[in-house]
């Protein structure tokens, strides 16, 4: 699909954004996991260590739950990956904030709910 402008492309991406992630269960896994695939676009090329962090927003606070660092092969304005979240670190029906950070600076963030017991 072609878009008439960069802003039309961004609008299409934003319209496909979700904020609820349902738990998936696989054979032999009674609890299941939340599987998240994501992509971020940056205004400036990024190189070096990229952190994806998750913060619990339960009870009105903001508590760091988990983080994962990755090293892109080359400088880029696009970063995408996937992650699996599971209990006990993460709990269903709780709100979370997911951030993408470089050198301690938040370049992208979103709020999401993990759904399913």
Image (spheres, rainbow, N blue to C red):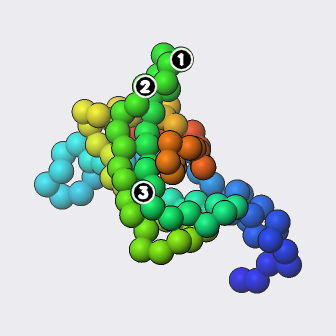
Residue 91: x, y in percent? 35, 32
Q: CA distance from mark 1 to mark 2?
A: 10 Å
30 lies left or right of 70? left
Q: CA distance from mark 1 to mark 3?
A: 30 Å
Q: CA distance from mark 2 to mark 3?
A: 22 Å
Estimate how packed mark 1 is, as few (under 14), some (14 to 19) or many (20 or more) residues with alpha carbons within 10 Å. Answer: few
Q: Mark number for residue 92? A: none
The residue lying at 56 percent from left, 63 percent from top is 46
The residue lying at 49 percent from left, 24 percent from top is 62
Quadrant where the C terminus lies? top left
The residue lying at 57 percent from left, 39 percent from top is 111
Q: Mark number for residue 49? A: 3
Q: Point out the residue furthest to the bottom here.
A: 2
Mark 2 element type: strand
Q: Point out the residue furthest to the left here.
A: 28
Q: Mark number for residue 63? A: 2
């Amino acid at each position: 699909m072609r878009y008439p402008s960069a802003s039309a492309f961004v609008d299409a991406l934003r319209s496909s954004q979700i904020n609820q992630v349902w738990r998936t269960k696989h054979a032999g896994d009674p609890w299941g996991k939340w599987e998240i695939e994501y992509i971020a676009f940056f205004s400036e090329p990024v190189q070096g260590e990229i952190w994806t962090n998750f913060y619990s927003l339960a009870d009105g606070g903001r508590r760091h739950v988990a983080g994962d660092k990755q090293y892109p092969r080359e400088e880029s304005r696009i970063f995408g990956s996937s992650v699996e979240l599971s209990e006990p670190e993460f709990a269903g029906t709780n709100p979370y904030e997911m951030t993408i950070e470089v050198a301690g600076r938040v370049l992208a963030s979103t709020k999401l709910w993990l759904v399913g017991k």
